[in-house]
Amino acid sequence: QKEVEQDPGPLSVPEGAIVSLNCTYSNSAFQYFMWYRQYSRKGPELLMYTYSSGNKEDGRFTAQVDKSSKYISLFIRDSQPSDSATYLCAMSAGSGGSNYKLTFGKGTLLTVNP
Amino acid sequence: DAGVTQSPTHLIKTRGQQVTLRCSPKSGHDTVSWYQQALGQGPQFIFQYYEEEERQRGNFPDRFSGHQFPNYSSELNVNALLLGDSALYLCASSYGQGRSFGPGTRLTVT
């Protein structure tokens, strides 16, 4: 069993749709949770960063963490064609500082159709 | 202010050869980590360098080695290349809570 499992597989939605992306994890040591966006042929860029269970909102993006269920989600409201990218969940143990390695899910390729 | 830069952008090698990839960290960052991202997969942690020493290592064989220089730049070396080493190699530099990824080097092994 992988430490981090990410669902769903490739996703294609119409512009304006609400998108839901999810990850589950098995390692209880994970304390910090991130969502990265990766455009084709580019490096990952940080979208959201959360620590505690609950919701965190940033514009059209909402990240949810449920540590009791070891489950995290990212919601994208009013999706735009420019949101088309691969979305990666990532987690780290410890204080979440930069000296802790990241463990990634396999990514979800999102296509938003005009 | 330049972000993380990596070179080369792409390269093609033959099985059994050796390769060196390079990374220049973002200004102000002192820690460099390397990740391997196979096609359709998430990045996998290879190792991390701080103060010119390997501080952490992921589950990668000794064929993968690295170095960090006094100016915080870093190299990733892979010996005896295998077809399975074909991937995007990402460098991430960091300091404190901040972390930035470079655009990666696409390595193809034939």
Image (tube, coloured by chain):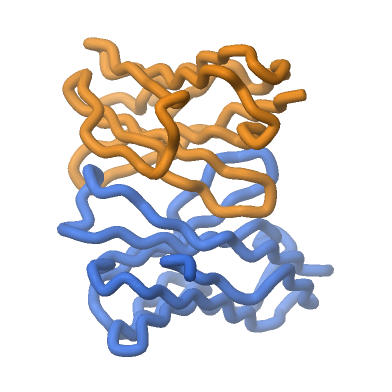
Chain colours: A blue, B orange
- Measuring from the top left, give residue B76's x and y in whole percent: 44, 21
In the picture, the quarter occupied by the N terminus of chain B is top left
Out of A13 and B83, give the one closest to the viewer.
Answer: B83
- Compared to residue A55, the image places residue A113 above or below, namely above
Outermost residue on the right side: it is A114
Out of A55 and A58, give the one closest to the viewer.
Answer: A55
Out of A48 and B79, give the one closest to the viewer.
Answer: B79
Residue B27 quadrant: top left
Q: Is residue B26 visible?
A: yes
* In this picture, residue A93 sits left or right of residue B21: left
- Measuring from the top left, give residue B72's x and y in whole percent: 27, 18
Q: Is residue B29 visible?
A: no
Residue A49 quadrant: bottom left
* In this picture, residue A47 sits left or right of residue A94: right
Residue at image point 59% right, 61% down:
A107
Residue at image point 69% right, 67% down:
A80
Residue at image point 30% right, 34% down:
B48
Instruction: Report the label total.
Output: 0
Residue A48 quadrant: bottom left
